[in-house]
DNA sequence: CTTGGCACTCCCTGCGGTGGAGTGCCAGAC
DNA sequence: GTCTGGCACTCCACCGCAGGGAGTGCCAAG
């Protein structure tokens, strides 16, 4: 029985602290929330919660502030997210439905997400690993220069330039085109890599060069896991703790490698992952939390999207927004 | 004679203020710089400069601070930029020489520029208007779906998807390909637009659709004047005047339309343009300055690059860095 | 035109006092 | 055993105030 109330107290403290940005005391707590107990009781609970590491005091005789561990418990015990309001739902669908191509969908999503959460939003392009090859096109720019265009099922297009040792005539080009397409088109990236690898081994010369280049373009995931970031202006709201918090975050936002590590593995579509403060992989960002989820057509988590913000954030609202955007985005990918 | 000294005083004040970030007084000024006059004389000059609007006092009995007009005079009278040190030159060339393609060149440039100036750097992709068409490729994804790939002399590649009303067979495709290439390849964008326009009028059907799409892709400058931004972490150094200065700037950095207006027309290659405070087109950014220059092969200013920073910045060093990066970048485009 | 001197202004800093919000603990009530 | 009211205590945030210092403007003399 007391256990339950303690959770309620923790929850109330988190909510108040997030709203007011100030340490919250026992008296204000019972007044603002309908707790049917006296401040003294709450004080006892708070002392216990502090002993267990869920709360902290900036200094003696000040109110309590949640610790990372406190936020963690808050998030874990909180199964019911804030539902999106009707207006928000409408905003999401009208905002995303107007998109014309993949780039547009992604950039709209990132803007939408940052506006809904008032945090910095990050959206990863659908990763290559689970998409398939739709078409490979070879364009002869010159007899010995080839433009290799790779078109994927997600609508993504990669192009590479290839310098050939020996010139290639038109019929050879046509043959080569149908050869690589025959091997790779329709296959998963992972399978296409294998198929092209064996092709390169079997047929030295131009075919091998083209196949190698394609394998490289497909394998080199890291460099192609493109990210879009938006809503950095929301960082201006940090106010206090500036150089310590905002600077490393701004740096991380430009270093896509760091950002990818921060997003982590694409979690299952539908599950929202929350990484609080020092739980994340980047030490400099110990005062920021990351809320992510996977998205993709047919509930395949092709990629990750989410937000980055201060540990003191509105977790229910943020998690709900992240999930909602991911769902709409998945649905759009289903259709396209 | 006095006129000259006044300029020297203004210059000294600007230098000190930029270095210390604090209002500078007469005594400190004569000590730090080798002015062979007394503080009283300097005070008279300062009073005169204030009357003319070049200086301002935060409050009575405080030191002086340059106004926008003061910075303007400082920049105009300052023909000799700080030369780059040998180490800096080496850094620039090694940094840029490793680039493999246009994307890489641009992203390296932006990083380099932000590191050299410790400001936010912006680099615009070479604009379409003065580049020529290298090749147009048509790829049949399906009988009625065409991928149109436009390759420009700058190395830029644009692709568009086209849904056809009527399917197109292979020979028709080959014809169409050679038709549009015959008309457009080698031409300036502006000329290619005209040629394709007449082609579209003369030949209804698929040819017109393709030509229209190409014209649209070429004409629609705004949406294609891509920008890359880097070094936003340097904004963390703003410290004071935060919400008023950094927030609008962060917003502008994400709104590429605003940013393009900020960069302005590509100034002649070799000339560095400085826009100080309210001289710029965006009111919210009245406390930031923009330093830009044009770049491009053979001294054609294909595009603009530059930095955005507080009005209180090291103009000589910044201008020199901007010019140096633009030169190296132009040279690389010459070779490629 | 420059310079030294002088009175004046105003900000910044440090200091002590006060008020308030909050805590911890204890004894009593349920 | 748990909750509650009361009480003493702590400590921060705020305020007013004085002192020092950096800077200015002005004036008379070189």
Image (spheres, coloured by chain):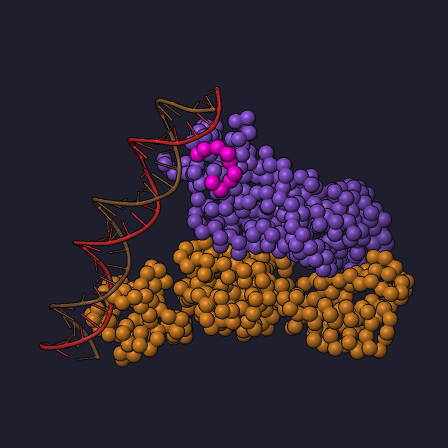
Chain colours: A purple, B orange, C brown, D red
Which residue is painted at 71% across and 50% down in the image?
A328
Is A239 or B253 nearer to us in this picture? Answer: A239
Which residue is painted at 67% across and 39% down in the image?
A271
Is A99 or C29 nearer to us in this picture? Answer: C29
Residue A104 as seen in the image, left or right of residue A278: right
Q: Main secondary structure of the magenta part?
A: loop
From where the camera sits, is residue A283 visible?
no
Is B304 or A169 nearer to us in this picture? Answer: B304
Which of the 4 image quarters holds residue B328? Answer: bottom right
Instruction: Relative to B62, say whether A198 is above or below.
Output: above
Q: Where is residue B263 in the image (x, y as percent from the top left)?
A: 54, 68
Which residue is painted at 31% across and 63% down in the image?
B23
Q: Position of residue B246 (x, y in %)?
A: 47, 59
Q: Quadrant of the N terminus of chain B?
A: bottom left
Residue B120 as seen in the image, left or right of residue A215: left
Indicate whether residue A24 is drawn in magenta: no
Instruction: Relative to B115, say whether B259 is above or below.
Output: below
From where the camera sits, is residue B51 visible?
yes
Residue C17 as seen in the image, left or right of residue A23: left
Which residue is painted at 66% across and 69% down in the image?
B221
Residues rendered magenta in the picture: A31-39
Q: In which quarter of the image is the C terminus of chain B?
A: bottom right
Residue B57 as seen in the image, left or right of residue A97: left
Q: Position of residue A210 (x, y in %)?
A: 76, 51
Q: Position of residue A53 (x, y in %)?
A: 47, 30
**Count of numbered circles on the image:** 0
């Amino acid at each position: 029985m007391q256990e339950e109330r303690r959770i309620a107290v923790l929850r109330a403290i988190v909510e108040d602290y997030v709203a007011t940005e100030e340490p919250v005391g026992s008296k204000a707590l019972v007044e603002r929330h309908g707790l049917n107990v006296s401040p003294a009781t709450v004080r006892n609970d708070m002392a216990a919660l502090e002993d267990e590491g869920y709360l902290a005091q900036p200094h003696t005789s000040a109110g309590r502030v949640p610790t990372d561990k406190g936020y963690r418990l808050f998030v874990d015990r909180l199964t019911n997210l804030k539902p999106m309001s009707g207006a928000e739902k409408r905003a999401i669908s009208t905002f995303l439905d107007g998109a014309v191509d993949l780039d547009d969908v992604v950039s709209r999503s990132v803007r939408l997400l940052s506006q809904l959460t008032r945090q910095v939003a990050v959206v990863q392009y659908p990763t290559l690993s689970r998409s398939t090859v739709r078409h490979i096109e070879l364009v002869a720019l010159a007899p010995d220069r080839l433009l290799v265009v790779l078109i994927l099922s997600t609508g993504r297009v990669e192009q590479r330039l290839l310098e050939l040792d020996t010139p290639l005539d038109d019929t050879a080009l046509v043959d080569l085109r149908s050869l690589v397409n025959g091997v790779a088109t329709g296959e998963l990236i992972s399978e296409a890599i294998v198929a092209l690898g064996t092709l390169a081994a079997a047929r030295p010369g131009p075919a091998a060069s083209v196949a190698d280049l394609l394998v490289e373009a497909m394998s080199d995931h890291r460099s192609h896991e493109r990210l879009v970031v938006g809503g950095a202006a929301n960082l201006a709201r940090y106010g206090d703790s500036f150089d310590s918090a905002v600077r490393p975050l701004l740096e991380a936002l430009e270093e896509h490698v760091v950002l990818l590590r921060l997003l982590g593995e694409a979690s299952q579509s539908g599950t929202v992952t929350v990484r609080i403060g020092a739980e994340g992989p980047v030490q400099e960002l110990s005062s920021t939390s990351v809320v992510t989820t996977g998205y993709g057509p047919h509930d395949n988590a092709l990629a990750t999207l989410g937000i980055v913000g201060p540990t003191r954030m509105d977790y229910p609202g943020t998690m709900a927004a992240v999930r909602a955007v991911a769902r709409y985005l998945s649905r759009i990918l289903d259709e396209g």
